[in-house]
């Protein structure tokens, strides 16, 4: 088991991301409103950030807030979760997109036991993928 953590800066993709994860059989997640250190310091007008550096964080189109999504997943769900993240959010190596990481879990209690993927899950993934592709196309047309 793994704890999957996604810090999502591109919050306009949240709905499609959650639908994609659910369709892929990742049915449980917690979504937390969050904010990065630099953005929080800039809001506080901290003396640690000079005015010239502060402008980099406030004028580059970055969202002020983000969402942190955490989910306990099976080891074999990581690849499909990554595919869903990349197809909805985009390339995480690009600025102001997000950060994805996992942490091994040696104990978990309170999660539902789910079987392996079946044809119903496959059709859910397919339907969700169509919505995701439509979303990505509309996002690319905006840029």
Image (tube, rainbow, N blue to C red):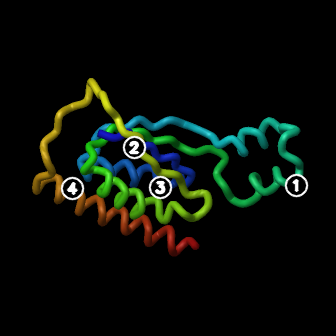
Q: Contact, CB < 8 Å: mark 4 with mark 3?
A: no
Query: How far apart are the alpha carbons under marks 2 and 4?
Result: 21 Å
Who comes first in sequence, dot 4 or dot 1? Answer: 1
Q: Contact, CB < 8 Å: mark 4 with mark 1?
A: no
Who comes first in sequence, dot 2 or dot 1? Answer: 2
Query: How far apart are the alpha carbons under marks 2 and 1?
Result: 35 Å
Query: How far apart are the alpha carbons under marks 4 and 1?
Result: 48 Å
Tell me the element at label 1. Answer: helix
Residue at label 4?
Answer: 124
Mark 2 against mark 4, which lies toward the viewer? 2
Numbered tag placed on residue 13 in the rendering:
3
Q: Contact, CB < 8 Å: mark 2 with mark 1?
A: no
Query: How far apart are the alpha carbons under marks 3 and 1?
Result: 30 Å
Residue at label 1?
Answer: 52
Numbered tag placed on residue 4 in the rendering:
2
Q: Contact, CB < 8 Å: mark 2 with mark 4?
A: no
Left or right: 92, with 62 as reference point: left
Horizontal and vertical percent position of residue 139? 50, 68
The answer to which of 88 and 92 lies nearer the viewer is 92
Who comes first in sequence, dot 2 or dot 3? Answer: 2
Task: Using the rendered view, name the quadrant where residue 60 is placed.
Answer: bottom right
**Quadrant of the image for the C terminus?**
bottom right
Horizontal and vertical percent position of residue 123? 17, 59
Who comes first in sequence, dot 4 or dot 3? Answer: 3
Mark 2 against mark 1, which lies toward the viewer? 2
Task: Using the rendered view, name the quadrant where residue 127 is placed.
Answer: bottom left
Residue sitting at x 82%, y 50%: 54
Tell me the element at label 3. Answer: helix
Q: Contact, CB < 8 Å: mark 3 with mark 1?
A: no
Numbered tag placed on residue 62 in the rendering:
none
């Amino acid at each position: 088991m793994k704890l999957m953590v996604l810090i999502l800066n591109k919050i306009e993709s949240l709905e499609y991301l959650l639908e994609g994860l659910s369709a892929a059989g990742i049915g449980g997640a917690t979504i937390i409103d969050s904010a990065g250190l630099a953005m929080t310091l800039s809001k506080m007008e901290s003396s640690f950030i000079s005015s010239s550096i502060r402008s980099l964080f406030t004028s580059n189109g970055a969202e002020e807030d983000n969402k942190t999504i955490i989910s306990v997943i099976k080891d074999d769900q990581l690849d499909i979760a990554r595919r869903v993240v990349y197809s909805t959010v985009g390339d995480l190596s690009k600025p102001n997109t997000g950060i994805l990481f996992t942490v091994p879990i040696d104990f978990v209690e309170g999660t539902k036991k789910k079987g392996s993927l079946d044809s119903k899950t496959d059709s859910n993934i397919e339907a969700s993928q169509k919505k995701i592709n439509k979303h990505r196309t509309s996002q690319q047309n905006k840029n």
